[in-house]
Image (spheres, grey):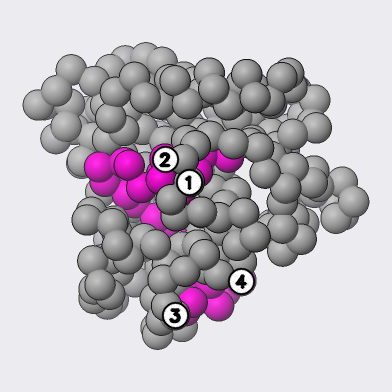
Amino acid sequence: METPINTFIVDQLHIHIYQNRQSLGSAAGYMVGAHMRALLAQQSQVRMIFAAAPSQNEFLQTLSEAEGIDWSRVVVFHMDEYIGLSSDAPQRFGHFLSERLFERVKPGQVHLIDSTGNLDTECRRYADLLRTAPIDIVCLGIGENGHIAFNDPPVADFADPLLVKPVALDLAARQQQVNDGCFSSLDLVPTHAITLTIPSLLAGKALFCMVPGETKRHAVQQTLQEAISTACPATILRHHANCSLYLDRDSSALL
C-alpha cells in the first residue's frame, strides 16, 4: 500500500497526505477495499454511497481492481444527480459511476437516482431505500466551494430533516463542472440537482473522503482551519466519529 508523506488529526478527522493523486487514489482504494472485506467477513451485506466526480477516478479504478471482495453482497447508492439532463446524457452521475465502477464489479444491488420524473416522488423513494438499513461506507469528495454532495453553502443544513432533496446549484459548483471538463461551457451545466443531505451522508458508519488537486486547496484549508459552519459545509466532517480525508501535495500544499 502507498505510504503517506504526512498524517495528522483535526478534531476527529484523520488526514492522510500523499505524494500525488495516483498515490492518494491507490491508498484510498486499498483502505476502502480492506474495510469492505472486513465487514463482509462479519455481516451478510455492505451498503455504500459513492460520489461521482473526476476527483474520484484514481480511487474508483483501484477499488474496481481490488481482489477478494464479494460484490454480490454489496448494495450501492450515489449521492447526487442533475435535474434536466436526458436519461442517457454522459454527464449524469449515475452513468459516471456505472461506467467506472458498477458495470465492472457488478454489485448485488445498484440504486440510481432517477431525476427525470416527479422529483418529490423520487426523493421519497430514494430516502426509503436509504432507510432500509444503516449505511456502512460513504465515499465522497469536497467541492471547490466546500460542498459535500450538492450541499452547497446556500442550501447546506447540518440539521436537515430530509435525507434526499432537490436543490439549486451554487454558481461555484456549476463552474467546477466546467473546470473539471464535464461540460464545455457554464450555460450547459444544469442549475438544479437532487442530492443526499448532510445528515444522510453523516449517517454512514465510515466515511472516506478523497480530495486531490490544486483547485481544491482553498476548500481543504477552509475545511480544516475555519469554524464548523455551512459557510464551508465540509467542515462538518471534523465532527464525524470515523472519517478519513485523503489529500495530495497539490490539494494540501502540505498545510
Real-space CA distance between mark 2 and mark 4, rounded to the nearest whole angstrom: 26 Å
Pointer 4: residues within 10 angstroms few (<14), some, or many (20+)?
some
The disc labelled 2 sits on which kind of residue? Answer: Ser
Q: Is residue 36 above or below residue 149?
A: above
Residue 192 position within the rendered picture, expressed as x and y whole percent measured from the top left: 74, 42
Contact check, label 3 and label 4, Cβ < 8 Å:
no
Q: Secondary structure at mark 2?
A: helix
User: Can you identify the residue that label 2 sits on?
Assistant: 200
Q: Residue at x 71, y 19 (%)?
A: 118
Q: Residue at x 55, y 78 (%)?
A: 218
Residue 115 position within the rendered picture, expressed as x and y whole percent measured from the top left: 69, 26
Quadrant hosting residue 247: bottom left
Instruction: Name the quadrant of the C terminus.
Output: bottom left
Q: Secondary structure at mark 4?
A: helix
**Which of the two labelled residues, at mark 1 and mark 4, occupies the earlier sequence position?**
1
Quadrant hosting residue 237: bottom left
Residue farthest along the left direction in this orientation: 42
Q: Secondary structure at mark 1?
A: loop
Give the number of the disc on residue 160. Answer: 1
Give the number of the disc on residue 226. Answer: 3
Does any portion of residue 50 appear in the rendered image? Answer: no
Instruction: Name the quadrant of the N terminus.
Output: bottom left
Q: What span is colored magenta in the figure? A: 195-222
User: Can you identify the residue that label 4 sits on?
Assistant: 215
Real-space CA distance between mark 2 and mark 1, rounded to the nearest whole angstrom: 9 Å
**Residue 208 belongs to the span the image colors magenta:** yes
Real-space CA distance between mark 2 and mark 3, rounded to the nearest whole angstrom: 23 Å
Contact check, label 2 and label 1, Cβ < 8 Å:
yes
The disc labelled 1 sits on which kind of residue? Answer: Asp
Along the line of sight, the residue nearer the viewer: 151 or 3: 151
Contact check, label 3 and label 1, Cβ < 8 Å:
no
